[in-house]
Amino acid sequence: CIPVLANAVSGLENILSALQVLLVLLLAERFSEPERRGAGCSAAMGLVLGWALLTRPDGGALCLLAVAMLHLFRLVQLKKWKGVVVSAAVCLFFAALVLLPWYIYQHRITGKVFTDSSLARMYAGRRSSIMLIPDVLYFHPKALVTLLSFFAPFSLGAVIWAAALCRTFLAERADWRAHFHRHLVEYVSLVIIAAGLAFYSFVVGADHFGRYFLVIFPLFFVAGIRGLNILFDGVRARFGGPVARVLILLASAYMLLGGGMDFYRRVIKPGSYSG
């Protein structure tokens, strides 16, 4: 927990990239409403996308994935490819307005469109990873281990939320277009969390978990809390309020205990980072 908090307030690009992902999802909600959808929304999404790609390439890639999914869902829902193509073109045009001046300047100064520093995060993350395919695919278990141990309550909640979303789809599959319209942002959030987990486990390598995964944490925490709320309601309905409250207390105590142990290991323990 301490690396997450430290990186969130460090003044680096991490928290800004996380906010950009959330901003894309906010625009996605507007994008899903016909009366608010238009060139202005697509232009704003393009500006945020270009800004995100300049801020942090991996966070920008997740924003690009979200934008692509939004247009794909809209195409599936409306079956009007012309409007989707125009919207995507406007989005990409405004993203290019943000990106091109920097890349042109960078090419003039360095002779390269992408500098070596843009790959530094990938190579630094691979140094302690398990090589699956040489120079292509690496695996670092820290993201999975941390989410399944220290953040276990949130991970459980995220799984419950995803399962509930799938169950809702099965119940409403007869009118699946309306279902996707109502839950568009949720599906995009789910894909971003899954893609981020896969990327930081197999591509970059999550030895610097607190810094790398910070882009995903806001969505992960919201998904976890929503899932825990579903679990709380289910337990309360079946076993009563006191049992449900005990469940919440146990989850809170688990997180506090883990945070306290991490604080001791990193700050108080002799030989820790602060010492």
Image: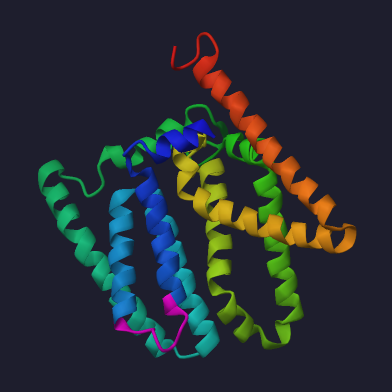
Q: Is residue 122 magenta?
A: no
Q: Please give the name of the residue rendered at 34% of the width and 84% of the height, measured from the top-left corner.
A: 38
Considering the image in quadrants, where does the C terminus appear?
A: top left
Residue 115 lies, in percent from the top left, at 25, 42
Give the left or right position of residue 70, taking residue 163 as reference. Answer: left
- Residue 236 found in image quarter: bottom right
**Residue depicted at x 58% and y 26%:** 262
Q: Residue 73, image x and y in percent?
A: 52, 78
The magenta segment is 30-39
- Number of marks in the rendered image: 0
Q: Residue at x 83, y 52 (%)?
A: 242
Q: Is residue 87 visible?
A: yes
**In the image, residue 197 above or below residue 22:** above
Looking at the image, residue 53 sits to the left or right of residue 165; the answer is: left
- Choose top left, top right, bottom left or bottom right for residue 172: bottom right
Residue furthest to the right:
239
Residue 88 in the image, given as x and y percentages of width and height: 36, 77
Q: Is residue 231 left or right of residue 223?
A: right
Q: Nearer the viewer, residue 126 or 22?
A: 22
Residue 36 within the segment the image draws in magenta: yes
Residue 89 visible? no
Considering the image in quadrants, where does the N terminus appear?
Answer: top right
> Residue reaching furthest front?
242
